[in-house]
Amino acid sequence: MIPSLLHSSRNFISDIAPWMVTGFMLTVTVLLIMSLPKMFRMLERIHLLVKIVLLLTILLGGFIRFAWVPDGHRIFFDEERYLSYAVNFARHGTAVSLIVTTPTQVILGDPDPAARVTVPVINAWTLKILGYEESYLFLVARIVSIVTILLIFFAVYLLFGDQIAATIAA
């Protein structure tokens, strides 16, 4: 059973922040999906050389993330804390660190005072949807970072209207 500490006013931020971040991320994802047709139309107007360089950048980014960076590594310091927040949010719906757990009792730590929950929320939803395996966290992190290359390109291109600057930024 989860202690009543979870429902105290002291932990209001740790209870509500992950859900706020989830709502924001869901909104951004829906807006990005809605703007996909505009992004594809924008890609049609880009020079062929820029398209080739962008594709090579995405392929190189994918290669670096999937073939070069190792999967398993020991989790150190902040990553361990963030993983603790992610597992706790996935299982209990609040962003506090998981200190000790036994078959009959869960002892929770203090909430993150800065409410840094973006990465733990992504990890928590990954764990909740795909399962509690570290390999899924690596996979989702790699996919998100590859998609980020394309999003940076579009953001810079929309802000400055310069294909070369957008390609360099990506």
Image: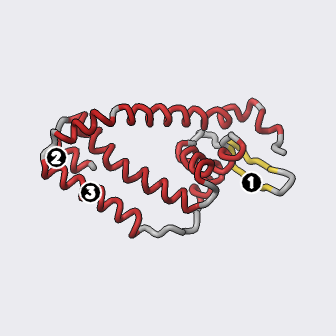
Q: Is residue 95 left or right of residue 153?
A: right
Disc 1 versus disc 2: distance between alpha carbons?
49 Å
Point out the frontmost of discs 1 and 3.
3
Q: What numbered label is drawn on residue 99?
A: 1
Please, what is the three-letter code of the amino acid marked with disc 1?
Answer: Ile
Q: Indicate which disc, 3 or 2, sits on the residue closer to the N terminus.
A: 3
Residue 164 location, x and y as percent? 16, 46
Q: Is residue 69 left or right of residue 132?
A: left
Please, what is the three-letter code of the amino acid marked with disc 3?
Answer: Thr
> How many neighbours does mark 2 have within 10 angstroms: few (below 14), some (14-19), or many (20 or more)?
some
- Residue occupied by mark 3: 57
State the SS at label 1. Answer: strand
Point out the frontmost of discs 1 and 2.
2
| Relative depth, front residue between 58 and 102 | 58
| Relative depth, front residue between 68 and 100 | 68
| Relative depth, front residue between 95 and 61 | 61
Disc 1 versus disc 3: distance between alpha carbons?
41 Å
Seen at 58% across and 61% down, the residue is 134
Q: What numbered label is drawn on residue 75?
A: none
> How many neighbours does mark 1 have within 10 angstroms: few (below 14), some (14-19), or many (20 or more)?
few
Which quadrant of the figure contains the N terminus? top right
Please, what is the three-letter code of the amino acid marked with disc 2?
Answer: Ile
Seen at 16% across and 50% down, the residue is 50
Q: What numbered label is drawn on residue 164?
A: 2
State the SS at label 3. Answer: helix
Seen at 64% across and 56% down, the residue is 132
